[in-house]
């Protein structure tokens, strides 16, 4: 079955907005696990705008599932990950000015650095995924650089399903879905894990979840979703919000 990684960054973001101790992303992670999450995902940004170092350390000690640390490919983050020991590190591009991650990692431009980072993380026992655009070139480069998996950037697909491109949205959504399908197939053929994330909601994730390999196993093995779950949680509570997303993925 496909796995759901629940990203609790936005819980921490609300906490940091007022500098309080609540809402607690550690408590949110515990609720998410009880509701069926297979993994907890956090992005430790260089500017520490939401998740803090101590959050990651406590999560590593306290959660019952796996910890996926999204991080920039910097020396500071590599040292932190090596000390903390998350189950996964997902290498992502990062700009101080962005509201959220704006696209996949440019592996061609950053090949030498990313290759070195992957080697160091894997030596410390951390599995590595690369957050990339759904292209054959990016998937092949991820394999060549030593990654264990790719996380395919689904931002354009999700925007299209939400009507962001006006009258061209439906056509764009179909085109982006096909790009995702081909990239995921290639990843699986190359021995990489095929993960996906960015912008998913309770409807557009269902179409991706119907994609299968020949033996009817899910083509995309893991989804990392945060914003839509936290938004839904504000209306119905976090446990129900996570359960509804699990259902959307497992019974689309």
Image: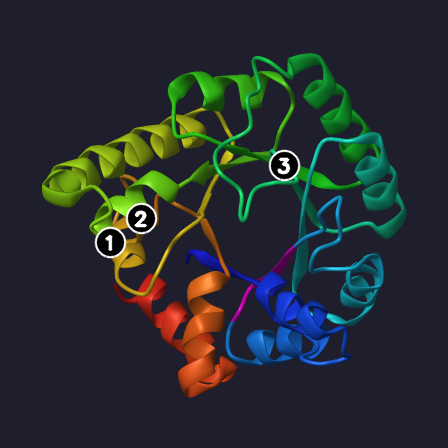
How far across and how far down the image is residue 166, in percent? 15, 44
How far across and how far down the image is residue 177, in percent? 25, 39
Which residue reaches farthest left? 167
Element assignment for label 1: loop
Q: In whole angstroms, how far apart are the C-alphas of marks 2 and 1? A: 6 Å
User: Would you say the residues marked 2 and 1 are in contact, meaning their CB atoms lie under 8 Å apart?
Assistant: yes
Q: Is residue 160 left or right of residue 115?
A: left
Sequence-first tag of 3 and 2: 3
Q: Is residue 139 visible?
A: yes
Tell me the residue at 71%/68% (across/down): 16
Q: Is residue 109 left or right of residue 137?
A: right
Q: In whole angstroms, how far apart are the C-alphas of marks 3 and 1? A: 25 Å
Tell me the residue at 31%/56% (across/down): 205
The residue indicated by pointer 1 is: 162
Q: Is residue 95 left or right of residue 247?
A: right
Q: Quadrant of the C terminus?
A: bottom left
Which residue reaches farthest bottom? 236
* Residue numbers of the magenta segment: 37-42
* Secondary structure mainly formed by the magenta segment: strand
Q: Quadrant of residue 56?
A: bottom right
Within 10 Å of disc 2 (Cα), the crowding (few <14, some 14-19, many 20+) is many
Within 10 Å of disc 1 (Cα), the crowding (few <14, some 14-19, many 20+) is some
Residue 249 vertical placement versus 79 (above, below): below
The residue indicated by pointer 2 is: 158
Element assignment for label 2: helix
The residue indicated by pointer 3 is: 94
Tell me the residue at 37%/75% (across/down): 244
Tag count in the figure? 3
Q: Is residue 251 left or right of residue 163?
A: right
Residue 237 in the magenta stretch? The answer is: no
Q: Quadrant of residue 112?
A: top right
């Amino acid at each position: 079955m496909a796995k759901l990684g629940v990203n609790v960054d936005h819980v921490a973001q609300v906490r940091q907005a007022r500098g309080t101790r609540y809402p607690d992303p550690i408590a949110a992670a515990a609720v998410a696990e009880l509701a069926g999450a297979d993994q907890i995902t956090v992005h430790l940004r260089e500017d520490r705008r939401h998740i803090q170092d101590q959050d990651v350390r406590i999560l590593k000690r306290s959660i019952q599932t796996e910890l996926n640390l999204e991080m920039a490919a910097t020396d500071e983050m590599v040292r932190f990950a090596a000390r903390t020991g998350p189950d996964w590190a997902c290498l992502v591009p990062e700009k101080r000015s962005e509201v959220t991650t704006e696209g996949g990692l440019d592996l061609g431009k950053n090949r030498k650095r990313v290759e070195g980072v992957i080697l160091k993380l894997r030596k410390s026992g951390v599995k590595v995924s690369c957050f990339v655009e759904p292209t054959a070139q990016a998937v092949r480069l991820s394999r060549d650089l030593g990654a264990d998996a790719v996380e395919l950037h689904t931002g354009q697909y999700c925007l299209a399903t939400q009507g962001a491109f006006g009258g061209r949205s439906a056509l764009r959504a179909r085109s982006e879905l096909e790009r995702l399908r081909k990239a995921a197939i290639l990843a699986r053929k190359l021995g990489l894990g095929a993960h996906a994330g960015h912008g998913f909601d309770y409807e557009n994730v269902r179409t991706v979840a119907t994609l299968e390999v020949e033996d009817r196993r899910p083509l995309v093995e893991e989804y990392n979703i945060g914003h839509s779950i936290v938004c839904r949680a504000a209306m119905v509570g976090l446990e129900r919000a996570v359960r509804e997303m699990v259902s959307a993925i497992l019974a689309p």
